[in-house]
Amino acid sequence: MALGVIALIIGAPWFARHGYPVTAAVIYQAFSPLCHQIPSRSFHFDGVPLAVCARCTGVYFGLIPGLMVYPLWRRVDSERMPHRAWLTAGIAPMAIDCVAGVVGMFSSPIAFRTATGILAGMAIASFILPGLVSIALTPSEDRRSRKSTAEASNTVVSG
């Protein structure tokens, strides 16, 4: 999935330059709720900005090494999530960089934005994988049953 998203990110400018403007526009539009897509803060392919900024590109590209190193420190078939501190440590540099830029403390270079995105993507991968394992290992009947039980427990009986 991560490789497919990366292909779309890189594919958008390729489609734009090779006579498929509608396809490119659809891809850019699909990523627009997730990223500001400011061209000066984006990598370019064939003279056209990628579908997301450098920081978001880093996040998506960071998923790949994150998924690759995951089995070196945790069992792949485990449904147990890592401690939240891992996610905080991975996302904190990106969040600090982002907030510092928004409040005008400094504007980091594109390489730093990308690096903090990669770190965040690697951390995010360690939380995505156990969730996907949980979905894969849980029969669909059990998921429906848990959902029904959860919905029933949230129902308020009025008198």
Image: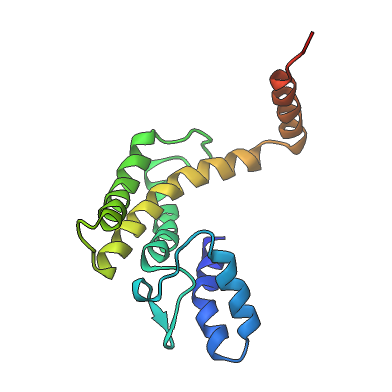
Front residue of this view, candidates 7 and 133: 7
Residue 3 spot, x, y in % from top left: 52, 66
Vertically, is 50 above or below 65? below
Tell whether 82 sits left or right of 78.
left
Q: Residue at x 52, y 84 (%)?
A: 14
User: In the orientation shown, which residue stands out farthest toward the left?
Assistant: 105
Q: In this view of the protein, can residue 100 be seen by the observer?
A: yes
Front residue of this view, candidates 98 and 112: 98
Q: Quadrant of residue 135?
A: top right
Q: Residue at x 41, y 59 (%)?
A: 59
**Which quarter shows the N terminus?**
bottom right
Q: Quadrant of residue 119?
A: bottom left
Tell whether 104 sits left or right of 75.
left
Front residue of this view, candidates 78 and 18: 18
Q: Residue at x 57, y 91 (%)?
A: 18
Q: In this view of the protein, can residue 76 be seen by the observer?
A: no
